Image (spheres, rainbow, N blue to C red):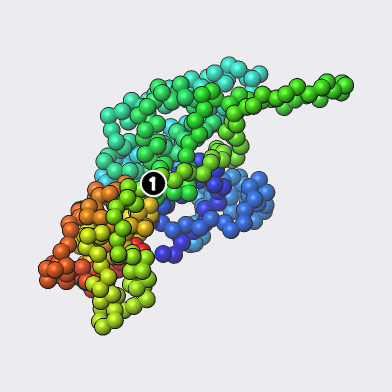
Amino acid sequence: MPSAGTLWTIPTQASGKAIRAVAAFGGVAIDLPQVYVHYQDNKKPEFTSKFGHGKTPAWEGNDGFLLFEGATITRYIATLAPNSGLLGKTKEEAALIDQMDAPHRKRARLSHDAHQAPPQRGPIHTIFLERQARALNTLEKHISTRTFFVGERITVADIYIATLVQRACISNLETAARKTVPNLIRHMDTLINQPAFAGIFGPTPVFDKAPDYVAPKKEKEQKPKAAPAPKAEKKPKPKVEEDDEDDNGIPEESKVKNPLDDLPKSTFNLEDWKRAYSNKETRGAGGALEWFYEHFDKEGFSIWRVDFKYPEELTQTFMSNNQIGGFFNRLEASRKYLFGSMGVLGAANASLISGALILRGQEAEPVVNVAPDWESYSFSKLDVSKDAEKAFFEAALAWDLEIDGKKWVDGKNFK
Protein backbone atom coordinates (compact mmCIF):
# COMPACT_ATOMS: atom_id res chain seq x y z
CA MET A 1 0.00 0.00 0.00
CA PRO A 2 1.50 3.39 -0.95
CA SER A 3 2.16 5.81 1.89
CA ALA A 4 -0.21 8.76 2.31
CA GLY A 5 2.57 11.03 3.51
CA THR A 6 5.08 11.78 6.26
CA LEU A 7 4.35 12.44 9.92
CA TRP A 8 6.92 14.58 11.73
CA THR A 9 6.95 13.50 15.36
CA ILE A 10 9.06 11.64 17.91
CA PRO A 11 8.26 8.24 19.46
CA THR A 12 7.42 9.67 22.89
CA GLN A 13 5.03 12.41 21.74
CA ALA A 14 1.47 11.65 22.88
CA SER A 15 -0.28 13.44 20.02
CA GLY A 16 2.04 11.65 17.59
CA LYS A 17 1.12 8.32 19.17
CA ALA A 18 -2.57 9.04 18.64
CA ILE A 19 -2.00 9.84 14.96
CA ARG A 20 0.06 6.69 14.42
CA ALA A 21 -2.57 4.60 16.22
CA VAL A 22 -5.39 5.99 14.07
CA ALA A 23 -3.35 5.23 10.95
CA ALA A 24 -2.63 1.67 12.13
CA PHE A 25 -6.27 1.05 13.04
CA GLY A 26 -7.54 2.46 9.75
CA GLY A 27 -4.97 0.67 7.60
CA VAL A 28 -3.48 3.97 6.36
CA ALA A 29 0.22 3.69 5.55
CA ILE A 30 2.28 6.65 6.75
CA ASP A 31 6.00 7.36 6.81
CA LEU A 32 8.16 8.76 9.59
CA PRO A 33 11.27 10.76 8.66
CA GLN A 34 14.33 8.53 8.35
CA VAL A 35 16.52 11.10 10.09
CA TYR A 36 15.06 13.66 12.47
CA VAL A 37 16.64 15.46 15.44
CA HIS A 38 14.04 17.16 17.57
CA TYR A 39 14.66 20.81 18.53
CA GLN A 40 17.11 21.03 15.64
CA ASP A 41 15.52 19.88 12.39
CA ASN A 42 12.15 21.45 13.22
CA LYS A 43 13.86 24.83 13.65
CA LYS A 44 15.57 24.77 10.26
CA PRO A 45 14.27 26.97 7.39
CA GLU A 46 13.26 23.98 5.27
CA PHE A 47 10.89 22.90 8.07
CA THR A 48 9.60 26.31 9.16
CA SER A 49 8.94 27.27 5.53
CA LYS A 50 6.27 24.55 5.58
CA PHE A 51 5.25 24.72 9.24
CA GLY A 52 5.75 28.30 10.33
CA HIS A 53 5.73 27.74 14.08
CA GLY A 54 8.27 24.92 13.87
CA LYS A 55 6.20 22.58 16.04
CA THR A 56 5.41 18.89 15.86
CA PRO A 57 3.44 16.82 15.12
CA ALA A 58 3.30 18.04 11.54
CA TRP A 59 1.92 16.31 8.45
CA GLU A 60 3.21 16.50 4.90
CA GLY A 61 1.02 14.56 2.47
CA ASN A 62 2.40 13.04 -0.70
CA ASP A 63 0.04 15.41 -2.51
CA GLY A 64 1.73 18.39 -0.82
CA PHE A 65 -1.05 18.93 1.72
CA LEU A 66 0.36 20.36 4.99
CA LEU A 67 -1.17 20.23 8.48
CA PHE A 68 -0.08 20.90 12.04
CA GLU A 69 -1.74 20.37 15.47
CA GLY A 70 -2.14 16.81 16.72
CA ALA A 71 -5.94 16.64 16.96
CA THR A 72 -6.35 18.08 13.46
CA ILE A 73 -3.94 15.60 11.90
CA THR A 74 -5.54 12.72 13.81
CA ARG A 75 -8.96 13.52 12.39
CA TYR A 76 -7.59 14.02 8.89
CA ILE A 77 -5.87 10.62 8.88
CA ALA A 78 -9.14 9.06 10.01
CA THR A 79 -10.87 10.53 6.94
CA LEU A 80 -8.45 8.55 4.76
CA ALA A 81 -10.04 5.36 6.15
CA PRO A 82 -13.76 6.20 5.91
CA ASN A 83 -14.89 2.59 6.33
CA SER A 84 -13.00 2.13 9.58
CA GLY A 85 -15.73 3.66 11.74
CA LEU A 86 -13.17 5.91 13.42
CA LEU A 87 -15.30 9.00 12.78
CA GLY A 88 -18.59 7.35 13.69
CA LYS A 89 -21.35 5.73 11.65
CA THR A 90 -23.87 8.58 11.76
CA LYS A 91 -23.79 12.37 11.81
CA GLU A 92 -24.81 12.20 15.47
CA GLU A 93 -21.83 9.99 16.34
CA ALA A 94 -19.54 12.28 14.34
CA ALA A 95 -20.80 15.24 16.35
CA LEU A 96 -20.24 13.41 19.65
CA ILE A 97 -16.67 12.62 18.60
CA ASP A 98 -16.08 16.28 17.73
CA GLN A 99 -17.61 17.24 21.08
CA MET A 100 -14.73 15.46 22.79
CA ASP A 101 -12.07 17.30 20.78
CA ALA A 102 -11.74 20.61 22.64
CA PRO A 103 -11.31 18.96 26.08
CA HIS A 104 -8.70 16.67 24.50
CA ARG A 105 -6.32 19.53 23.88
CA LYS A 106 -6.81 20.98 27.35
CA ARG A 107 -6.20 17.66 29.03
CA ALA A 108 -3.02 17.18 27.02
CA ARG A 109 -1.64 20.37 28.57
CA LEU A 110 -3.10 19.78 32.02
CA SER A 111 -1.27 16.52 32.55
CA HIS A 112 1.93 18.21 31.42
CA ASP A 113 1.61 21.48 33.34
CA ALA A 114 0.44 19.81 36.55
CA HIS A 115 3.77 18.01 36.65
CA GLN A 116 6.04 20.76 35.39
CA ALA A 117 4.79 23.72 37.48
CA PRO A 118 7.68 24.63 39.82
CA PRO A 119 7.28 24.92 43.61
CA GLN A 120 7.32 28.71 43.61
CA ARG A 121 4.09 28.57 41.60
CA GLY A 122 2.35 26.37 44.18
CA PRO A 123 -1.17 27.84 43.79
CA ILE A 124 -1.01 27.46 40.01
CA HIS A 125 0.24 23.91 40.39
CA THR A 126 -2.74 23.13 42.66
CA ILE A 127 -5.18 24.66 40.18
CA PHE A 128 -3.78 22.50 37.38
CA LEU A 129 -4.18 19.38 39.49
CA GLU A 130 -7.77 20.29 40.37
CA ARG A 131 -8.64 20.88 36.73
CA GLN A 132 -7.07 17.61 35.73
CA ALA A 133 -8.99 15.71 38.42
CA ARG A 134 -12.25 17.32 37.31
CA ALA A 135 -11.66 16.37 33.66
CA LEU A 136 -10.72 12.80 34.55
CA ASN A 137 -13.77 12.41 36.80
CA THR A 138 -16.06 13.62 34.02
CA LEU A 139 -14.58 11.06 31.65
CA GLU A 140 -14.86 8.37 34.35
CA LYS A 141 -18.61 8.98 34.72
CA HIS A 142 -19.09 8.79 30.97
CA ILE A 143 -17.16 5.56 30.39
CA SER A 144 -18.41 3.77 33.53
CA THR A 145 -21.54 2.56 31.69
CA ARG A 146 -19.98 2.08 28.26
CA THR A 147 -17.30 0.09 26.49
CA PHE A 148 -16.35 2.95 24.16
CA PHE A 149 -16.83 6.70 24.38
CA VAL A 150 -19.00 6.99 21.26
CA GLY A 151 -21.05 4.14 19.79
CA GLU A 152 -20.16 0.46 19.91
CA ARG A 153 -16.78 0.52 18.20
CA ILE A 154 -13.42 2.20 18.65
CA THR A 155 -13.38 5.76 17.34
CA VAL A 156 -10.93 8.64 17.24
CA ALA A 157 -12.35 9.75 20.59
CA ASP A 158 -11.27 6.50 22.27
CA ILE A 159 -7.77 6.61 20.84
CA TYR A 160 -7.14 10.25 21.69
CA ILE A 161 -8.54 10.01 25.21
CA ALA A 162 -6.60 6.82 25.97
CA THR A 163 -3.43 8.48 24.70
CA LEU A 164 -3.86 11.49 26.96
CA VAL A 165 -4.85 9.43 30.00
CA GLN A 166 -1.66 7.44 29.55
CA ARG A 167 0.21 10.74 29.30
CA ALA A 168 -1.27 11.78 32.65
CA CYS A 169 -0.33 8.43 34.18
CA ILE A 170 3.24 8.84 33.00
CA SER A 171 3.64 12.41 34.24
CA ASN A 172 1.74 12.73 37.51
CA LEU A 173 -1.22 10.36 38.01
CA GLU A 174 -0.15 8.30 41.01
CA THR A 175 -1.70 5.05 42.25
CA ALA A 176 -4.21 6.66 44.63
CA ALA A 177 -5.49 8.98 41.89
CA ARG A 178 -5.85 6.11 39.42
CA LYS A 179 -8.06 4.24 41.87
CA THR A 180 -10.60 7.06 41.69
CA VAL A 181 -11.06 6.52 37.92
CA PRO A 182 -10.94 2.70 37.52
CA ASN A 183 -13.14 2.55 34.41
CA LEU A 184 -11.08 5.20 32.65
CA ILE A 185 -7.87 3.31 33.44
CA ARG A 186 -9.50 0.09 32.23
CA HIS A 187 -10.47 1.81 28.97
CA MET A 188 -6.93 3.16 28.55
CA ASP A 189 -5.35 -0.25 29.16
CA THR A 190 -7.72 -1.90 26.67
CA LEU A 191 -7.03 0.65 23.95
CA ILE A 192 -3.26 1.07 24.18
CA ASN A 193 -2.68 -2.70 24.38
CA GLN A 194 -4.48 -3.48 21.14
CA PRO A 195 -2.14 -5.64 19.02
CA ALA A 196 -2.52 -3.23 16.11
CA PHE A 197 -0.81 -0.60 18.26
CA ALA A 198 2.27 -2.68 19.07
CA GLY A 199 5.33 -0.46 19.16
CA ILE A 200 3.30 2.75 19.54
CA PHE A 201 2.29 3.00 23.20
CA GLY A 202 4.08 0.37 25.27
CA PRO A 203 3.23 -0.28 28.95
CA THR A 204 2.28 2.45 31.41
CA PRO A 205 4.59 2.92 34.43
CA VAL A 206 3.01 2.82 37.89
CA PHE A 207 4.25 4.82 40.87
CA ASP A 208 2.88 5.27 44.40
CA LYS A 209 3.77 8.96 44.46
CA ALA A 210 4.06 11.34 41.54
CA PRO A 211 7.62 12.44 40.75
CA ASP A 212 8.47 15.78 42.37
CA TYR A 213 9.60 18.79 40.44
CA VAL A 214 13.30 19.45 41.13
CA ALA A 215 14.34 23.06 40.61
CA PRO A 216 17.82 23.79 39.22
CA LYS A 217 20.37 24.17 41.99
CA LYS A 218 21.93 27.58 42.53
CA GLU A 219 25.68 27.89 42.51
CA LYS A 220 27.15 27.93 46.02
CA GLU A 221 30.56 28.75 47.40
CA GLN A 222 32.62 25.59 47.39
CA LYS A 223 33.28 24.05 50.78
CA PRO A 224 35.57 21.21 51.81
CA LYS A 225 33.95 17.93 50.93
CA ALA A 226 32.84 15.73 53.77
CA ALA A 227 33.38 11.99 53.70
CA PRO A 228 30.72 10.51 51.44
CA ALA A 229 27.92 8.75 53.28
CA PRO A 230 26.52 5.51 51.86
CA LYS A 231 23.63 6.28 49.53
CA ALA A 232 20.27 4.68 50.11
CA GLU A 233 18.96 2.78 47.14
CA LYS A 234 16.22 4.71 45.34
CA LYS A 235 13.55 3.44 43.05
CA PRO A 236 13.92 4.81 39.53
CA LYS A 237 11.41 7.51 38.66
CA PRO A 238 9.88 7.88 35.22
CA LYS A 239 11.77 10.40 33.15
CA VAL A 240 9.62 13.23 31.81
CA GLU A 241 10.94 15.21 28.88
CA GLU A 242 9.14 18.22 27.48
CA ASP A 243 8.60 18.48 23.77
CA ASP A 244 6.44 20.73 21.63
CA GLU A 245 3.03 19.32 22.60
CA ASP A 246 3.64 16.71 25.31
CA ASP A 247 5.51 13.53 26.21
CA ASN A 248 8.15 11.16 27.53
CA GLY A 249 9.71 7.74 27.19
CA ILE A 250 8.30 4.42 28.40
CA PRO A 251 9.83 0.93 28.78
CA GLU A 252 9.42 -1.92 26.36
CA GLU A 253 6.30 -4.07 26.46
CA SER A 254 6.56 -7.42 28.21
CA LYS A 255 5.54 -10.53 26.33
CA VAL A 256 2.64 -12.72 27.46
CA LYS A 257 2.31 -16.37 26.50
CA ASN A 258 -0.57 -17.15 24.14
CA PRO A 259 -2.81 -20.13 25.12
CA LEU A 260 -2.71 -21.26 21.49
CA ASP A 261 0.90 -22.27 22.09
CA ASP A 262 -0.35 -24.98 24.46
CA LEU A 263 -2.29 -26.82 21.74
CA PRO A 264 -0.91 -30.24 20.71
CA LYS A 265 1.85 -29.99 18.15
CA SER A 266 0.64 -30.05 14.55
CA THR A 267 2.23 -31.60 11.49
CA PHE A 268 1.05 -28.64 9.40
CA ASN A 269 3.66 -25.88 9.25
CA LEU A 270 1.86 -22.60 8.65
CA GLU A 271 5.04 -20.78 7.61
CA ASP A 272 5.78 -23.44 5.00
CA TRP A 273 2.24 -22.99 3.67
CA LYS A 274 2.68 -19.21 3.46
CA ARG A 275 5.86 -19.70 1.44
CA ALA A 276 4.15 -22.23 -0.84
CA TYR A 277 1.24 -19.84 -1.42
CA SER A 278 3.63 -16.98 -2.20
CA ASN A 279 5.87 -18.91 -4.57
CA LYS A 280 3.48 -21.21 -6.44
CA GLU A 281 0.52 -20.71 -8.73
CA THR A 282 -2.62 -21.09 -6.64
CA ARG A 283 -4.40 -23.61 -8.86
CA GLY A 284 -3.13 -26.39 -11.10
CA ALA A 285 -0.68 -29.28 -10.85
CA GLY A 286 2.10 -28.55 -8.40
CA GLY A 287 0.28 -25.43 -7.24
CA ALA A 288 -0.27 -24.04 -3.78
CA LEU A 289 -3.67 -25.68 -3.29
CA GLU A 290 -2.26 -29.09 -4.17
CA TRP A 291 0.50 -28.52 -1.59
CA PHE A 292 -2.08 -27.47 0.96
CA TYR A 293 -4.22 -30.60 0.63
CA GLU A 294 -1.14 -32.81 0.89
CA HIS A 295 0.02 -31.24 4.14
CA PHE A 296 -3.07 -29.89 5.93
CA ASP A 297 -3.72 -31.14 9.47
CA LYS A 298 -7.47 -30.79 10.12
CA GLU A 299 -7.01 -31.65 13.81
CA GLY A 300 -4.53 -28.89 14.51
CA PHE A 301 -5.93 -26.24 12.15
CA SER A 302 -9.29 -25.22 10.74
CA ILE A 303 -10.61 -23.29 7.72
CA TRP A 304 -13.12 -20.46 8.04
CA ARG A 305 -15.20 -18.24 5.83
CA VAL A 306 -15.23 -14.59 6.91
CA ASP A 307 -17.75 -11.93 5.83
CA PHE A 308 -18.13 -8.26 6.78
CA LYS A 309 -21.53 -7.92 8.46
CA TYR A 310 -22.36 -4.41 7.26
CA PRO A 311 -21.93 -4.24 3.46
CA GLU A 312 -24.40 -1.33 3.35
CA GLU A 313 -21.67 0.80 4.96
CA LEU A 314 -19.21 0.14 2.13
CA THR A 315 -18.73 2.84 -0.51
CA GLN A 316 -15.73 2.97 -2.85
CA THR A 317 -14.09 -0.40 -3.47
CA PHE A 318 -10.56 0.91 -2.88
CA MET A 319 -11.70 2.16 0.53
CA SER A 320 -13.14 -1.27 1.31
CA ASN A 321 -9.82 -2.82 0.35
CA ASN A 322 -8.09 -0.40 2.74
CA GLN A 323 -10.52 -1.59 5.41
CA ILE A 324 -9.30 -5.16 4.87
CA GLY A 325 -5.76 -3.88 5.27
CA GLY A 326 -6.70 -2.23 8.55
CA PHE A 327 -8.35 -5.41 9.81
CA PHE A 328 -5.26 -7.42 8.93
CA ASN A 329 -3.05 -4.84 10.69
CA ARG A 330 -5.10 -5.34 13.83
CA LEU A 331 -4.60 -9.12 13.58
CA GLU A 332 -0.81 -8.71 13.80
CA ALA A 333 -0.57 -10.40 17.22
CA SER A 334 -1.96 -13.61 15.68
CA ARG A 335 0.35 -13.70 12.67
CA LYS A 336 1.99 -16.99 13.74
CA TYR A 337 -1.43 -18.65 14.04
CA LEU A 338 -3.21 -17.33 10.96
CA PHE A 339 -3.31 -17.06 7.18
CA GLY A 340 -5.96 -15.06 5.37
CA SER A 341 -7.16 -14.14 1.92
CA MET A 342 -9.96 -11.58 1.77
CA GLY A 343 -11.30 -9.42 -1.00
CA VAL A 344 -13.81 -6.83 -2.15
CA LEU A 345 -16.51 -8.12 -4.48
CA GLY A 346 -18.84 -5.95 -6.55
CA ALA A 347 -18.78 -2.26 -7.43
CA ALA A 348 -18.84 1.10 -5.68
CA ASN A 349 -21.79 1.40 -3.27
CA ALA A 350 -22.77 -2.19 -4.07
CA SER A 351 -19.98 -4.35 -2.72
CA LEU A 352 -19.19 -6.84 0.02
CA ILE A 353 -16.09 -8.12 1.80
CA SER A 354 -15.51 -11.84 2.04
CA GLY A 355 -12.73 -14.40 2.12
CA ALA A 356 -11.17 -17.35 3.89
CA LEU A 357 -8.91 -17.89 6.89
CA ILE A 358 -6.69 -20.80 7.89
CA LEU A 359 -6.10 -20.68 11.62
CA ARG A 360 -4.67 -22.61 14.54
CA GLY A 361 -7.11 -24.70 16.54
CA GLN A 362 -10.79 -25.40 16.01
CA GLU A 363 -12.27 -22.07 17.12
CA ALA A 364 -11.91 -18.75 15.33
CA GLU A 365 -12.42 -16.39 18.26
CA PRO A 366 -9.16 -17.09 20.17
CA VAL A 367 -7.22 -16.18 17.03
CA VAL A 368 -9.19 -13.22 15.67
CA ASN A 369 -10.27 -11.52 18.89
CA VAL A 370 -6.96 -9.65 19.05
CA ALA A 371 -8.56 -7.26 16.52
CA PRO A 372 -10.96 -4.91 18.34
CA ASP A 373 -13.36 -4.91 15.37
CA TRP A 374 -13.47 -8.71 14.93
CA GLU A 375 -17.16 -8.79 15.85
CA SER A 376 -17.92 -6.72 12.75
CA TYR A 377 -17.25 -9.91 10.79
CA SER A 378 -19.04 -13.25 10.77
CA PHE A 379 -17.02 -16.46 10.84
CA SER A 380 -18.27 -19.88 9.69
CA LYS A 381 -16.18 -23.04 9.60
CA LEU A 382 -15.63 -24.61 6.17
CA ASP A 383 -15.54 -28.32 5.45
CA VAL A 384 -13.47 -28.81 2.30
CA SER A 385 -14.80 -32.36 1.91
CA LYS A 386 -18.00 -30.67 0.69
CA ASP A 387 -17.82 -29.47 -2.90
CA ALA A 388 -19.47 -26.05 -2.40
CA GLU A 389 -17.37 -25.13 0.63
CA LYS A 390 -14.19 -26.37 -1.05
CA ALA A 391 -14.99 -24.27 -4.13
CA PHE A 392 -15.48 -21.16 -1.95
CA PHE A 393 -12.16 -21.76 -0.16
CA GLU A 394 -10.21 -22.25 -3.39
CA ALA A 395 -11.78 -19.23 -5.09
CA ALA A 396 -10.96 -17.01 -2.11
CA LEU A 397 -7.32 -18.07 -2.30
CA ALA A 398 -7.19 -17.74 -6.09
CA TRP A 399 -8.87 -14.31 -6.00
CA ASP A 400 -11.61 -15.34 -8.44
CA LEU A 401 -14.42 -15.64 -5.90
CA GLU A 402 -17.91 -14.58 -7.01
CA ILE A 403 -20.92 -14.18 -4.70
CA ASP A 404 -24.45 -13.36 -5.88
CA GLY A 405 -23.14 -12.02 -9.17
CA LYS A 406 -20.56 -9.81 -7.47
CA LYS A 407 -17.07 -10.51 -8.80
CA TRP A 408 -13.72 -10.15 -7.05
CA VAL A 409 -12.34 -6.63 -7.53
CA ASP A 410 -9.33 -6.43 -5.22
CA GLY A 411 -7.97 -8.16 -2.16
CA LYS A 412 -5.26 -8.66 0.41
CA ASN A 413 -3.44 -11.56 2.04
CA PHE A 414 -2.50 -11.99 5.67
CA LYS A 415 0.65 -14.09 5.74
> Measured from the top left, where is residue 288 in percent x and y?
29, 75
Q: Is residue 411 above or below residue 336?
A: below
The residue nearer to you, when weighing 365 against 41, is 365
Q: Quadrant of residue 238?
A: top right
Check the image and name the residue furthest to the bottom. 285
The residue nearer to you, when weighing 298 against 126, is 298
Left or right: 177 as drawn, with respect to 274: right
Residue at screen point 40% across, 31% down: 185
Regarding mark 1 in the picture, which secondary structure is present there?
A: loop
Instruction: Please state which amino acid type lies under the numbered disc 1.
Output: Lys
Q: Residues within 10 Å of mark 1 (few under 14, many from 20)?
A: few
> Measured from the top left, where is residue 65 in percent x and y?
49, 57
Residue at screen point 45% across, 39% down: 163
Residue at screen point 50% across, 34% down: 205
> Measured from the top left, where is residue 305 in percent x and y?
20, 60
Q: Quadrant of the C terminus?
A: bottom left
Q: Quadrant of residue 400?
A: bottom left
Q: Is residue 129 above or below residue 340?
A: above
Badge 1 is on which residue? Answer: 257
> Measured from the top left, where is residue 387 in percent x and y?
12, 71
The residue nearer to you, when weighing 152 against 221, is 221
Look at the image and tell me whether residue 72 can be seen: no
Look at the image and tell me whether residue 147 can be seen: yes
The residue nearer to you, when weighing 330 against 29, is 330
Residue at screen point 25% across, 59% down: 300
